[in-house]
Image (tube, grey):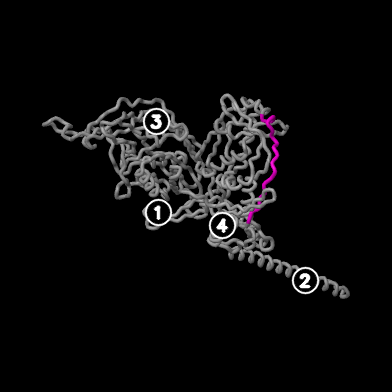
Amino acid sequence: MVEINLNNLPDMLGVEKKNKSWLKITLAIFLTLFVVVGVVFGGAAWYVQLYQNKIYSGVYAGHYHLGKMTRDDLNNFIETTNNRLAKEGLNLEAEVNGQKTAIKINTVSLGENSTELVNLDSYTLWQNAYTAGRTGNWAVRLFSPWYFMFNNQDLLVPVKTDWVNLLESLKYSLSKLVNAPRNAGVQITNFVTASYNVVPESSGLVFKYEDIISQIQNNLGELYLGNIAIRAQQFDPTIKTTDVVKAAENLPNFLSYGDIGLNYIDPQTKIRHDWNLPVSQYSAWLEVQPDENNLPIFVLSHEKIKTYLEGLRYLVDKIPLDAKFSIATGTADGKVKEFQASQTGLTLNVDKTLQNLSDAFKQRNYHSTEVIKTVSLVVDAAEPVVKTIDVNDLGIEDIIGAGYSTFKDSHNNRIKNIAHAVERLNGTLIKPGEIFSAIKYAGPFTAENGFLPEAVIKGTEIKNEIGGGMCQIGTTLFRMAMNSGMNITQRQNHSLVVGYYSDPVNGNPGTDAALYEPMLDLKFVNDTGSYLLLQTDIDYKKQQLTFTLWGKPDGRKGSYTHPLVKKWIPYGEQQDVKTDKVKPGVIKCQAPFKGAVASFIYTRVTPSGEQIDRVFDSYYRPLPKICMVGVDPATLCKPGETCETPPVANLDTLEPVPTISSPIAGTTTTN
């Protein structure tokens, strides 16, 4: 039998009651926290959803609140400001010796090719404003919008500046108010013999133009369009004639290092650009400055080299682009009707490039055995908000490879034919396992299909045929396919060496591909296991085609060597062909073509890592200068004989050629 001490019963019950009470409190606290967390997270999620496609509240540019603005709202706001800027210009208040002068700088240059000297960049501002609070881990993205409500996010509006023309405009307007002080300098009269003259120093007042441009950019970045106060400053020379003479002792050695190169490889298209700064050019940019040990040395003029680098910006700068993707309905091949690949924004970092270039030149003052001969442009990147992989379910996410060619100096109809084919190819979807055919997707090359006639070589004749110039398409596709690591199943070189298709590095023939319907085609296999998308671009200013292949990267790589010419074949003596196809008394000639035997190696690395080398050999037949001599049809043959037209050689691919017509009595020339 269990005995219970009744005297201890109240204490035992009290313990049980206390335990239950603590359990209730703990449960209540847990439930309260759960509700609070649920409300906070739910509220944050609701807030994020509420501002979908809008800028979060609390984001400012200058004193202007951008919160709740959509992309269209922001564009309208910035463009209104740009219109005001174009109308009112930049208003400077220049002070010289205590006297103030109002100066107005027009922000739109006049002339046939008018440009905007300064312009607010609404697209990049949208990128920066919309992504504010939308980057980082999930917690940051969830709670940053609430933080902005109590702590404003201040942004500077990106300002696009035509630095070169703005500098020129400022100098033109302000140089009238001051004299032209300077440090002592050097004027090289003969860079071969290192002969020079010393430009003596002088003191006076000067405007610091680079500082003024920075001030303009900062003011506009804060959306301030009021007067900008600037002041001329006293300039006392720090470099004297004796310093220049001392530095010039090293001038022969300095110039002996020769030219210096600049290069840039586009990270998206992989196209390489090279520039050469010859001694004859940079010798005019030299000035003397003290080094770290206070010794006078030669350096590059900051202003002049910056002006030069700004001139390269148009080849580098790209705005970041959000992806767009939609497939046309009702088309047999499911062509993409709207495609805008996401594009990482690129901006030439002029200041860092300038510093690297300056450092390379400083080495030349110290009798170094090894100096830098090439400097790479420094480029900054900005990622887009919406990437390509986010807007399609075909697995298309990035660039597989790209190819390019130039159509410089093409005839008008040739350019129109190329542009028409570019339009037809753009957006082509290539199915997994499909053999891509250039003729299938770009052709048929007929007048009914929008192609125009062009003067071409066919055999020994110059004649008009529909679709001249399509080999520009074939060549660009060929290079794109190789840079993408594709298996090329059909390619034929031209029968003649055509300048349009010379290698962009060494100028040799060999990497061309002919198109002539229906026999000569460019084909490759989509063996990636995913869809491929062909994107085409024609740049009329640069006279360049760029074809880009998009897909799902699988580790493959493709590259090819620059072609080598094993043998050049002389074109021989001129041939005159009497014909009634040219008006009597007129000679129509074509330029001669040297023949060549060329080859290059295409290297393809498969996803498994296997390397496959393939040699492409090309033979180009020589063709002499052929002149079509216009005669009376009756003189082509003797009486009683059958008149026949000149024989035509085997088929040549159609390519426009330069020709000129002239009377027989005159001197005939060819381009």
What residue does disc 1 label? 334
Disc with the residue nearer the chain's start (2 vs 3): 2
What residue does disc 2 label? 20
**Residue 31 x/y as whole percent:** 70, 68
Disc with the residue nearer the chain's start (1 vs 4): 4
Specify the quadrant of the image occupied by residue 84. bottom right
Disc with the residue nearer the chain's start (2 vs 1): 2
Q: Is residue 386 above or below residue 17?
A: above
Please give the name of the residue rendered at 52% of the width and 36% of the height, measured from the top-left corner. Answer: 274
Q: Is residue 448 above or below residue 40?
A: above
Residue 601 shown in magenta? no
Q: Is residue 131 or residue 388 the one in the foreground?
A: 131
Disc with the residue nearer the chain's start (3 vs 4): 4
Nearer to us of marks 2 and 1 is 1
Q: What's the distance in space between the residues labelled 2 and 1, CA to CA?
A: 69 Å
Nearer to us of marks 2 and 4 is 4
Q: Is residue 37 above or below residue 270?
A: below
What residue does disc 3 label? 617
Residue 240 shown in magenta? yes
What residue does disc 4 label? 88
Q: Is residue 209 or residue 316 the one in the foreground?
A: 209
Disc with the residue nearer the chain's start (2 vs 4): 2
Q: Is residue 667 left or right of residue 133?
A: left
Q: Is residue 320 left or right of residue 499?
A: right
Specify the quadrant of the image occupied by residue 544. top left
The C terminus is located in which quarter?
top left
**Residue 645 x/y as whole percent:** 20, 34
Q: What's the distance in space between the residues labelled 2 and 3, CA to CA?
A: 91 Å
